[in-house]
Amino acid sequence: MVRLEGYRACEAVLRAPEARQALYDEGAVVMEGTLLTLHGAEHAARRAVEVRVFRRDFLRHYAREVYPATLETTLTPFLAAGGGDLVDLGYRATVNLTADFAGIDRPENNDEETGALLAIVKLFSEGATLVHATGDRDAIVARVRSALAAFETRFLAPSRDRRKAILHARGAEALPRDVLSVIVAAESELPLDPATLAREMAFYMQAGAHSTANATVHAFHELWHWAGDAADRQERLAEPLFVQRAVHESLRLHPASPEAWRTLVAPLSLPGLATLPSGARLVLDLHAANRDRTVFGDEADRFIPDRALPEGVLPSGLSFGVGVHSCLGRELDGGTLARPGIPANSVNLGIVPMLVARLFALGAAPDPDDPPTADPRTSRPNWGRYPVRLVKAQ
Ligand code: HEM
């Protein structure tokens, strides 16, 4: 097992075709055969089909036309209560988003249905990140198996059958734009057995919801403490492009997965290191790489939203991955990064910046009587509860 902590070394491995995904081997119950775990030609074929959903025109349409309404519906109970748990809000807002992209219908469109899907998706996340679980692993696997069965019966089967019926009656043009539709339409090009399809959809649901919710809470926390009582900083919380940049800076400090794991399928030479043999297992410490002082400077550990970056380094560092497995949801969640001088209203801000900006507009503040706590179910540094009050909502 070789551990790499430097930014350039981690980036080189993520881009290397010799390195196969290995982080989810333990989470096979929900991850086996999913896009993130495939390698080589099999991965390229699956990705080429699924990437069709993530085209820029659709992301823009989704962020502008669909998501604002979803967000307001999700916020309604929090507004009525004058606050709530930000982790829960993050999950509720993003579970609907992810379901839209994955192609999981919610015909009832009510709180109970969102809650049921959310409970299932949280179990999928526990299954996928089993390698970092702190609880009894067999019990987690058993819970994930029942969640997969419940998901199949209540959500996946009706969504799949509806798409098949549309395809049969009206053709591919009439299908909704989502991952399940492209898979149903590409059945001969990309046949997936029912169990693999269920895991693929489960993977999308958890990949999107879990990381989006965590990114939202971390960004809120960082920005809240950064602004403090300084009036000039508080004013900047109302600037959408600043919030977007700050979300990416927070993502750099808090990668959804603090490590990536790879196994070499052929020898790999890395600059400054001996050639690593085929079969070597590599742990890429993304948390450390994103704080590499040779890239991000002496204050690499600090949250500095306006920081200058070297050419070719993303503000979010390696947090969305790079190379063949780079995140398909990056522009959806983080938006299209604004270039200097571009007006805010012409930029796709991204779901997380939109959500964080809305929270500040509502005067969200940590609840002084109920401090946030870390998630005890994982060794990953995530918030488990983050109670806030919406001061301007009343
Ligand atoms: C802030 C939110 C998110 C973060 C930080 C994030 C992070 C990542 C990372 C690090 C990877 C690569 C993992 C690796 O190389 O081992 C990845 C892959 C992926 N992400 Fe995301 N993600 C986010 C949101 C989303 C959303 C919303 C979706 C879908 C709606 C999504 C879909 C995917 C998919 C499909 C892959 C696999 C790509 C492949 O293997 O070819 N992600 N994500």
Image (tube, grey):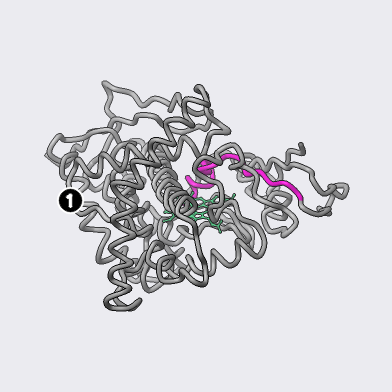
Say what secondary structure mark 1 lies in.
loop
Residue name at image x 42 percent, y 41 percent: 214
Could you tell me residue 163's position as x and y percent? 31, 66
Residue name at image x 36 percent, y 26 percent: 372
Residue name at image x 21 percent, y 35 percent: 83
Report if residue 86 lies within the magenta region: no
Residues in magenta, as a range? 248-264
Q: Quadrant of the N terminus?
A: top right
Judge from the rendering whether residue 323 lies leftward or rightward of residue 228; answer left or right: right
| Closer to the camera in the image, 331 or 95 | 95
Q: Quadrant of the C terminus?
A: top left
Query: Which residue does the numbered mark 1 point to in the structure image?
Result: 108
Position of residue 125 relative to residue 170, above or below, is above
Residue 155 visible in the shown view = yes
| Closer to the camera in the image, 192 or 34 | 192
Judge from the rendering whether residue 193 lies leftward or rightward of residue 10; answer left or right: left
Q: Tell me if mark 1 has few (under 14), some (14-19) or many (20+) residues whose alpha carbon lies within 10 angstroms of its own.
A: few
- Identified by mark 1, the residue type is Glu
Judge from the rendering whether residue 292 lies leftward or rightward of residue 156; answer left or right: right
Residue 225 visible in the shown view = no
Could you tell me residue 53's position as x and y percent? 42, 67
Quarter holding residue 101: bottom left
Could you tell me residue 112's position as x and y percent? 20, 40
